[in-house]
Image (cartoon, helix red, strand yellow):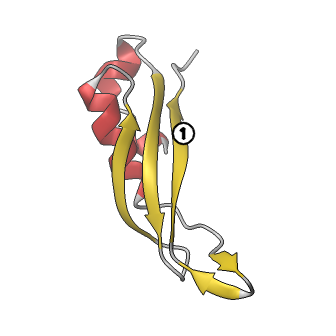
Amino acid sequence: MRQHYPKILQDAGIGGTVFVWVFIDTNGRVQNAQVQRGSGNAALNAAALEAVYEFEFTPALNMDKLVEVWVAFPVTFHVPE
């Protein structure tokens, strides 16, 4: 996820957590995402949305059937030391 952390924010010591709603399909791939609760920084919010589309999840099951699902997922950008 480091490649999605805007360098200008890293250099300025700005980090934070973005809570993203993620829609996961029956293959475990992200099909849609939206900010649920932002970090207070638009660039971090955008970077989080960009990053989650690269994630792969274990598909959800309901009564032993694969199902699509929305989940809330935190994306945290830590300021490098």
* Other-residue count near label 1 (Cα within 10 Å), few / some / many at <14 / 14–19 / ≥20: some
Residue that protrudes farthest toward the right in the picture? 64
Q: How many marks?
A: 1
| Residue 3 image offset from top left, x and y in percent | 41, 44
Q: Nearer the viewer, residue 65 or 16?
A: 65
What is the quadrant of the C terminus in the image? top right
The residue that appears at 39% across and 39% down in the rendered structure is 36
Rendered position, 33 above or below 28: above
Relative placement, left or right, of 11 versus 19 is left
| Residue 8 image offset from top left, x and y in percent | 29, 22
Rendered position, 69 above or below 27: above
The residue that appears at 68% across and 78% down in the rendered structure is 61
Residue that protrudes farthest toward the top in the picture? 12
Residue that protrudes farthest toward the left in the picture? 42
The residue that appears at 51% across and 76% down in the rendered structure is 68
Report the residue marked by disc 1.
74
- Find numbered disc 1 in the image and state the secondary structure of the residue it sits on: strand
| Residue 39 image offset from top left, x and y in percent | 39, 24
Q: Nearer the viewer, residue 67 or 9?
A: 67
Relative placement, left or right, of 49 versus 1 is left
- Residue flagged by tag 1: what amino acid is it? Pro
| Residue 13 image offset from top left, x and y in percent | 42, 11
Residue that protrudes farthest toward the front in the picture? 63
Where, by quadrant of the figure, is residue 42 drawn?
A: top left
The residue that appears at 41% across and 50% down in the rendered structure is 51
